[in-house]
Amino acid sequence: MAEPDPSSLMNFWENVSMTILGVLFTIGAFWLGIMRRLLSKEDIVELIELHSPYSKERESIMTRLEISRDMQTQFANALQKNTEVMAELKTQLAVLSKTLENIENRIDKQ
């Protein structure tokens, strides 16, 4: 069996080491160029809190919700009062009907 040529063996290890160095350099360049600019979770939360349209209009939205709740309460109160008035009118109508019936009976008797 023939022994490997020392120069070709040296070239092999030289190629392997240069490839490894190239890969490490590429990873380092990627990290410095791209990964460094990526946002952290805290940065994203801060951006959402400060720059989202909802946070800018939050006070306006809350004011509108409060006005809407007040209007719903007023509507419910008005509806309850109308129901009570309708019940009272129904009772008064029954009394008037009975009174009218009594008046008609008196007129018929005369």
Image (tube, grey):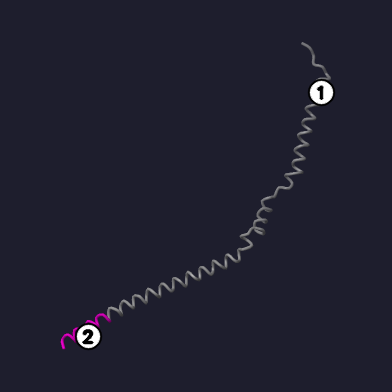
- The residue under the point 75% across, 38% down is 27
Q: Residue 21: image x %, image y %?
A: 79, 33
Q: Residue 107: image x %, image y %?
A: 19, 86
Q: Is residue 35 left or right of residue 105?
A: right
Does the magenta segment cover residue 106? yes
Q: Is residue 45 above or below residue 31?
A: below
Q: Is residue 81 left or right of residue 26?
A: left
Q: Residue 79: image x %, image y %?
A: 41, 72
C-beta proximity under 8 Å, tags 2 and 1: no
Report how far apart the C-alphas of labels 2 and 1 lie in the structure: 128 Å
For the C terminus, which image quadrant?
A: bottom left
Residue bearing the label numbered 2 = 103
Q: Is residue 71 left or right of residue 50?
A: left
Residue range corresponding to the magenta coloring:
96-110
Residue bearing the label numbered 1 = 11
The three-letter code of the residue at mark 1 reads: Asn
- The residue under the point 37% across, 75% down is 84
| For marks 2 and 1 on the same chain, the one whose residue lies earlier in the sequence | 1
Element assignment for label 1: helix
